[in-house]
Image: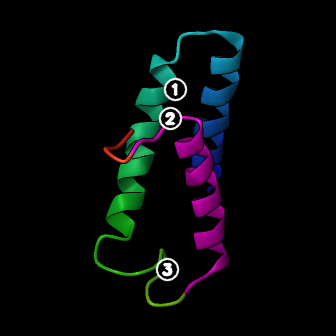
Amino acid sequence: MTEIENRGFGWLFAKRRGEELGEHETGFAPIADALRDAIADRPWLSGESFTVADIFCATMLGNAFHNELLTEDGP
C-alpha cells in the first residue's frame, strides 16, 4: 500500500501544481501491474482471505481511479 500511496499522492500533488505528470504515471504502472498479478488467480491479495491489505489497496486504487491516474484499461 505504501508504494501505491507514494506514487498516487505524488502524482496528485504534481497534477494540482500543474507539473509534468509523465514520471508519476510511468512510476505507477509497475505497481498497478504487480497488484493485477497478485490477484490474477485468487480472490484477495493474501489468497483466500479478505484482509486489511485489501481495504488499504482498494482505497488507494479507488482514489487513483477517481483522479484519473488509473483507468479501466490500465494506468
The CA distance from mark 2 to mark 1 is 9 Å
Q: Secondary structure at mark 2?
A: loop
- Of 70 and 35, the residue lying toward us: 70
Q: Nearer the viewer, mark 2 or mark 1?
A: 2
Location of residue 7 with respect to 3 vertically, above or below: above
Which residue is the site of mark 3?
46
Asked if disc 2 and disc 1 are in contact, CB closer than 8 Å, the reply is yes
Location of residue 3 with respect to 47 vertically, above or below: above
- Of 63 and 36, the residue lying toward us: 63
Q: In the image, what residue occupies the spot 36% across and 60% down?
A: 36
Which residue is the site of mark 1?
24
Q: Is 60 contained in the magenta span? A: yes
Q: Would you identify the image quadrant in which residue 16 lies? A: top right
Location of residue 42 with respect to 70 vertically, above or below: below
The kind of residue tagged 3 is Ser
Classify 10 Å Cα crowding around label 3: few (below 14), some (14-19), many (20 and above): some
Classify 10 Å Cα crowding around label 1: few (below 14), some (14-19), many (20 and above): some
